[in-house]
Amino acid sequence: QNPNHYAKIKETEFDHSYAVSESLALAVDAIHRQQPERAVASAVNKAILEANPQLIGLGSYWEPNAFDGRDADFVSVAPENDQSGRYLPYWNRASGQVAVEPVTEYDTADWYNIPKQTRQPWASEPYAFPIAGQPVMMVSLMVPILSEGRFLGAVGADYPLQGLQAILAEVRPFGSGQASLLSNAGLYASHPDSSRLGQPAQDLPAAALAAIRQGQAYEF
């Protein structure tokens, strides 16, 4: 089995998931500009998630009154808006069925604030996020929604680390080895021991972690 083959599969999965984020960002921005209807935007969001089973969740998260200027009309209106009426639909399949809930923790989360600050797409480090009351290990692929440089919100596609685990579990270097995947920050995005997911790779030499940060190969 060629590890490069599985690396290509992983790269393709991430590229496709980024494309999903970009497509939803374009779609909801067009709805926002032409005829901002939350029900229409949510129906599009749900349909795109249903068409992409590799994702655990997909949503568009808007700044206060940025989608339709009507947050006051949706105060505490479940399930797509928070208590302030802000439009934050997070469609996900964590419960086994596709359902929606308002996203949480965005005020302090890198996955929202970094695209807001940089106005650029961004991929998170592996992390645990509560969905339907359960923590799920994932990577978020974020795309900002912009209007003439002004940040309106962000779209996020959440790729579960279970998907990477399934792909890399098939890799057997030299016939009996095992494969892991690390993020640039040296966190395990995949590991034969699932309890290591999202944890620092403290079992690797410092030189190996430095090479990973620089995107370079390392052998030991």
Image (tube, helix red, strand yellow):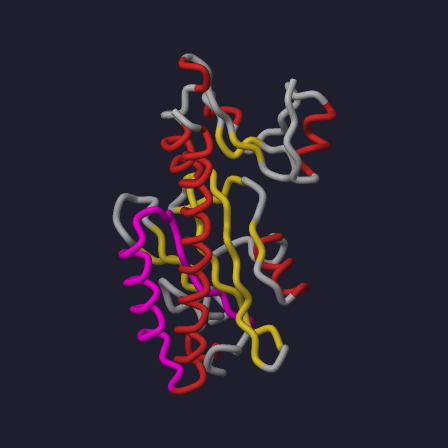
Q: Is residue 45 in the magenta section?
A: yes
Q: Nearer the viewer, residue 187 or 89?
A: 187
- Residue 135 visible to the viewer: no
Residue at the (40%, 67%) spot, across then down = 24
Look at the picture and state if 210 lies above or below 91: above
Give the image location of residue 153, x and y in percent: 54, 69
Q: Quadrant of the N terminus?
A: top left
Give the image location of residue 131, x and y in percent: 41, 46
Give the image location of residue 88, x and y in percent: 46, 65
- Residue 21 visible to the viewer: yes
Where residue 8 sits, quadrant-wise, is: top left
Where residue 99 sits, quadrant-wise, is: bottom left
Q: Nearer the viewer, residue 171 or 138?
A: 171
Residue at the (45%, 19%) spot, across then down = 173
Residues in magenta? 35-63
Q: Is residue 214 in the magenta section?
A: no
